[in-house]
Amino acid sequence: MEKNIGQLLKEAARALNQSIDRFAAPYGLTGNQMSLIDFMSRQPNLTCSQQQVEHEFNIKRSTTTVMLQRMAAKGLLDQHPSATDGRKKVVTLTAKGQGLIMPVHSFIQEKDQQLLENLNPTEIQAFRRILVMIKEEAEHD
């Protein structure tokens, strides 16, 4: 029996996450922590709010707090109160965290190339369109 789209997506996501975890392990990090470094590298001044992290990764505040605390303990980021609202936390990559940006970007680019290498430009465009459509459909459920 052929697997449904949801099963295939789940299996593909799990395999991709395992690959990211394997890449992150030699750095003493998890795949999620590496993904956070990638996310923060695309933010102005390498800074974002804890709330942005929660939204980007669709995780609860308590989970985000633990992840940020662990990364701060490793010297990868600094946390401080927002200048405009002391109740909110702002997170900034440290020099050590910034040192991981290039390896993370290289890994992501290499992984993208591996995933798309057997597709022609029309198939790549269709694949991207399908992924966006699935994401948008799920957000409206």
Image (spheres, grey):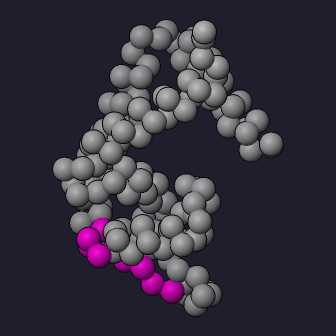
Q: Is residue 78 magenta?
A: yes
Whether residue 65 sits left or right of residue 61 in the image: it is left
Please name the residue shown 27% across and 43% down the image: 23
Q: Is residue 102 visible?
A: no
Towards the viewer: 73 or 43? 73
Give x and y (percent) for residue 103. Answer: 26, 46
92 to 114, vertically: above or below: below
Q: Kindly give the residue lying farthest to the bottom in the view shown.
A: 86
The stretch of residues the image draws in magenta is 73-81
The residue sitting at 58% across, 90% down in the picture is 86
Name the quarter where the N terminus is drawn: top right
**Residue at the left extreme?**
26
Picture quarter with the C terminus: top right
Residue 95 place in picture, x, y as percent: 26, 68
Displayed quadrant of residue 99: bottom left
Vertical placement of residue 22 versus 11, above or below? below
Where does the image place residue 93, in percent across and percent down from the top left?
Answer: 36, 68
Classify residue 67 by image quadrant: bottom left
